[in-house]
Amino acid sequence: MSRCRGYLFTCLVAIVLKCLLYETVQASKVNCVKEKDTVLLLKKVTGFNGSKHTGSGDINQRSLSPWTWRWNHDSMRIPRSIPEAVCPDKCISISGVPDDTLNSLEIHQQILVLKINETRGCLPVYRVETLNVTVGCTCVNPMVIYS
């Protein structure tokens, strides 16, 4: 009989501990900060002398290879949205007409981003990744291969 009571007591303790653990996990989920209640602070980077560069218009439209922008979105990344240049098929001359003697070429830059790797409880775990981004376009002389 006492052996049965010991076994019953052990089972009761195990059930109580499991319930407490379950309630703790559920409470931590309820107390998680919701994304809409958070603010991500990023430092705005300016020129080397601390002032913003002021040009005369958008450089992408003044280029001889005028590019457009498209947004690269990824909800599992910081930053979530990254602008990328989309190069035209042809370059234009200074007079504004298509120039078939030049090739439009992408300019790439590698940047570091944070990707959500996993979630531990309420907190996401990030890993640093390198992303190759098209940042602009330029015109180059075509590569001529003589045979």
Image (cartoon, helix red, strand yellow):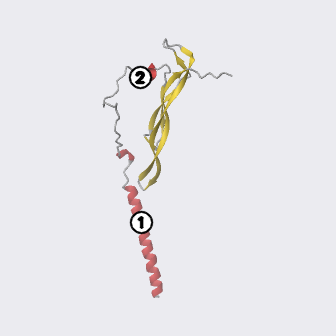
Q: Is residue 82 above or below residue 144?
A: below
In front: label 2 or label 1? 2
Which residue occupies the extreme left position in the image?
Answer: 50
Placement of 98 over or under 19, stated as above or below: above
Pick out the residue farthest to the right.
Answer: 147
Report the residue at 45% width, 21% height from top.
Answer: 61
Point 36% across, 55% down: residue = 31
Q: State which tag comes first along the sequence, 2 or 1.
A: 1
Count the marks.
2
Return the mark for residue 58: 2
Asked if residue 97 is positioned above or below residue 79 in the image, the reply reads above
Q: CA distance from mark 2 to mark 1?
A: 58 Å
- The residue identified by callout 1 is 21
Expressed as whole percent of the image width and height from the top left, the position of residue 86 reads 51, 27
**Residue 26, quarter of the rendered image:** bottom left
Q: Residues within 10 Å of mark 1 (few under 14, many from 20)?
A: few
Closer-to-camera residue (95/19)? 95
Of the 4 image quadrants, the one containing the C terminus is: top right
Residue at disc 1, secondary structure:
helix
Q: Position of residue 42 (x, y in %)?
A: 35, 40
Q: Amino acid at mark 1?
A: Leu
Q: Is residue 16 above or below residue 60?
A: below
Q: Are marks 2 and 1 in contact (CB under 8 Å)?
A: no
Residue type (three-letter) at the residue carrying disc 2: Asp
Closer to us: 126 or 104 = 104
